Amino acid sequence: MNEQPTAIEVEGSFLQVRKIGNSLGLILPKELLARLNLKDGDKLHVIEQPERGLHLTPYDPVHAKGMEIARKAFKTYANTFRELAK
C-alpha cells in the first residue's frame, strides 16, 4: 500500500494526494480556498465525471434534498420518463 502520491493539475498548480492519519486526502492551497470561499469544516459535494474526473461543488442541503426527491420520482416513474424521452 505504499503507492506513489498522485499529482493532479489544477489551474497551473498541482494538488497531491497525501496520507493523513489512516486516510488519504488533498491539501488545498489557501489561495484556492480563498477564491472558492471555502473554510475549515465546509462540505463539498462530489460528482464523478467520465475519464477519472471529479466535479466538486459546495454542499447545499436544500439542493441535496431536491435531488433525493427527483431520484425517487425518476425511479417511481421510470417508464413514464422513458416514454417522454422518445
Image (cartoon, rainbow, N blue to C red):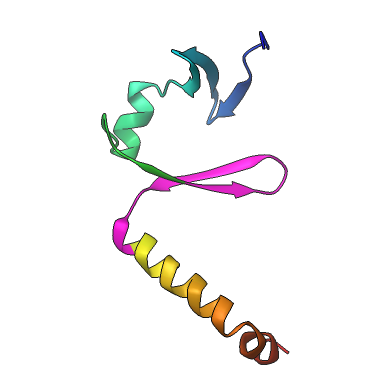
> Would residue 70 be found to the left or right of residue 43 on screen?
right
- Write the residue at 48% across / 15% down: 22
Q: Give yes or no for residue 81 being in the magenta stretch.
A: no
Q: Give yes or no for residue 57 being in the magenta stretch.
A: yes
Region in magenta: 46-62
Displayed quadrant of residue 63: bottom left
Displayed quadrant of residue 42: top left
* Above or below, 41 relative to 29: below
Q: Which quarter of the rendering shows the C terminus?
A: bottom right
- Write the residue at 26% across / 32% down: 39
Q: Residue furthest top?
A: 2
* Above or below, 60 relative to 82: above
Between residue 70 and residue 6, name the one nearer to us: 70
Image coordinates for residue 44, horizontal then vertical, percent: 39, 42
* Above or below, 58 relative to 38: below
- Write the residue at 68% across / 85% down: 82
> Would residue 13 be found to the left or right of residue 41 on screen?
right
Image coordinates for residue 54, horizontal then vertical, percent: 57, 42
- Write the residue at 29% across / 31% down: 34
Image coordinates for residue 66, horizontal then vertical, percent: 38, 69
* Above or below, 60 relative to 12: below
Image coordinates for residue 51, horizontal then vertical, percent: 73, 43
